[in-house]
């Protein structure tokens, strides 16, 4: 019996000693990790600053299966994201940000409160040095858990290092991949659409498009409007001299739609036309290269643009189809040649059959292809979604000589 009492007393003393030891440990942690990423500073900053890009990147989670929710806006000060992962939760809120320079955030990782700092700096090798710092204060139980698992600093260091490597992989190996194919002259068939129009600075266009499409989609969904085909952008003007562009983001419809005057959105129809089709496979940031390749093809083959017809960007495969930006497909249509007559339906007497007259296609030209393959890496990528962010070259004036001057080299170099 005395032995049991002694054992109990020893265990009690050990527990007290352990508690004293844990309580006297420094509960503060301050960990910093750095990595040079082979991407422009503005690209890296924009990626980190948009919480939508965190969804399948494993930033601060080390797992790409977490279920995320977001604030209405996902970019900039005041935005936030929450996630759940194996009965564990986390959230991050952006408190302050200096464009292309730094981001300050508050984070809660499974109950642990932390401050998170991001710093972005140019390097001499056309890359970006990213510094990620996390600091905070551990509770008694968190200190005990940290001691058992090797210390808070080591755990945080692994988390930050993993986050930086995931960003590096996605930006260098997935976002930088692209393939451009100047396809052929085709007939772009007529289509009814509902759209949202604006005029803005060219530099503001990507953000505007990203904001306008969700609003338009919400209107279509909430009103049960029947759609037909993939969303697209209809470019009206693109004035590089004044730095302004006018465009309409559109969702194609099954049937013609009438919208009352004063509505936020507009309905319309695009008539069928001959067009040079150019296809980009890859992230939207490569769209300007695709437009340049198309205009170069037009100049080299002495094709005549029809400036009265639409210039379109159709998002055939996008973020709603796959989160891998290297698999996004965008089709560009540049109008070529004279306007086409509309389809004519001739009713045959005493018969239910109809005959549709369709203008023939023009000569098919040999495709030209440009490819750039990603670097090999062992990390399994699941990039985050992004909204269409088109960048166009200047809209040509009504002068075929102008089109012939648009010769831009579109071969690429390895990142």
Image (cartoon, rainbow, N blue to C red):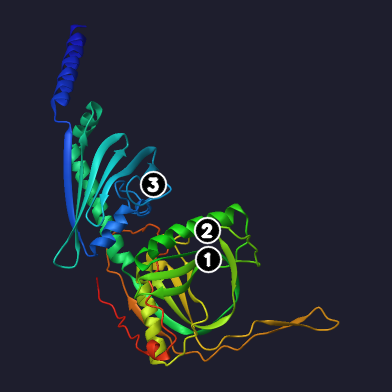
Foreground of the two, 85 or 227: 227
Q: Position of residue 128 (x, y in %)?
A: 20, 61
Q: Position of residue 262 (x, y in %)?
A: 58, 58
Secondary structure beneath label 1: strand
Q: Which residue is mark 3?
A: 66
Q: Is residue 195 left or right of residue 153?
A: right
Q: Specify the quadrant of the image occupied by residue 339.
A: bottom right
Quarter the C terminus occupies: bottom left
Secondary structure beneath label 2: helix
Q: CA distance from mark 3 to mark 1?
A: 32 Å
Q: Specify the quadrant of the image occupied by residue 150.
A: top left
Secondary structure beneath label 3: loop
Foreground of the two, 248 or 191: 248
Q: CA distance from mark 2 to mark 3?
A: 28 Å
Sequence-wise first label, 2 or 1: 2
Q: Which residue is rendered at x = 44% and y = 86% of the image?
A: 398
Foreground of the two, 303 or 199: 199
> Mark 3 and 1 residues: CB-CB less than 8 Å, in contact?
no
């Amino acid at each position: 019996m005395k032995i049991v009492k002694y054992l109990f007393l020893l265990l009690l003393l050990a527990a007290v000693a352990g508690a004293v030891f844990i309580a006297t440990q420094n509960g503060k942690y301050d960990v910093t990790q750095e990595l040079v990423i082979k991407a422009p500073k503005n690209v890296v900053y924009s990626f980190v600053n948009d919480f939508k890009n965190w969804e399948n990147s494993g930033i601060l989670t080390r797992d790409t299966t977490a279920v995320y929710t977001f604030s209405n806006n996902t970019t900039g000060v005041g935005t936030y994201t929450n996630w759940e992962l194996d009965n564990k939760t986390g959230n991050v809120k952006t408190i302050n940000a200096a464009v292309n320079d730094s981001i300050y955030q508050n984070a809660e990782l499974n109950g642990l409160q932390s401050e998170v700092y991001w710093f972005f700096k140019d390097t001499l090798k056309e890359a970006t040095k990213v510094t990620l710092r996390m600091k905070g204060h551990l509770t008694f139980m968190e200190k005990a858990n940290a001691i058992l698992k090797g210390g808070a600093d080591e755990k945080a260091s692994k988390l930050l290092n993993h986050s930086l490597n995931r960003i590096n992989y996605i930006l260098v190996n997935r976002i930088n991949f692209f393939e451009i194919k100047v396809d052929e002259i085709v007939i772009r068939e007529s289509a009814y659409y509902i759209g949202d129009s604006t005029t803005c600075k060219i530099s503001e266009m990507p953000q505007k498009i990203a904001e306008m499409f969700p609003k338009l989609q919400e209107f279509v969904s909430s009103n049960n409007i029947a759609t037909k085909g993939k969303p697209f952008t209809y470019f009206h003007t693109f004035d590089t001299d004044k730095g302004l562009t006018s465009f309409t983001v559109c969702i194609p419809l099954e049937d013609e739609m009438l919208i009352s005057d004063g509505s936020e959105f507009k309905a319309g129809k695009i008539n069928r036309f001959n067009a040079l089709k150019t296809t980009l496979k890859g992230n939207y940031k490569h769209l300007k290269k695709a437009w340049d390749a198309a205009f170069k093809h037009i100049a080299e083959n002495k094709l005549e643009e029809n400036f009265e017809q639409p210039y379109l960007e159709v998002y055939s495969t996008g973020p709603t189809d796959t989160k891998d930006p290297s698999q996004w497909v965008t089709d560009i249509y540049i109008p070529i040649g004279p306007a086409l007559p509309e389809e004519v339906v001739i009713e045959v007497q005493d018969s239910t059959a109809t005959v549709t007259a369709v203008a023939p296609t023009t000569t098919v030209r040999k495709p030209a292809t440009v490819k750039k393959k990603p670097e090999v890496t062992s990390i399994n990528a699941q990039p985050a979604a992004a909204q269409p962010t088109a960048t166009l070259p200047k809209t040509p004036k009504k002068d075929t000589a102008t089109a012939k001057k648009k010769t831009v080299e579109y071969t690429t170099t390895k990142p």
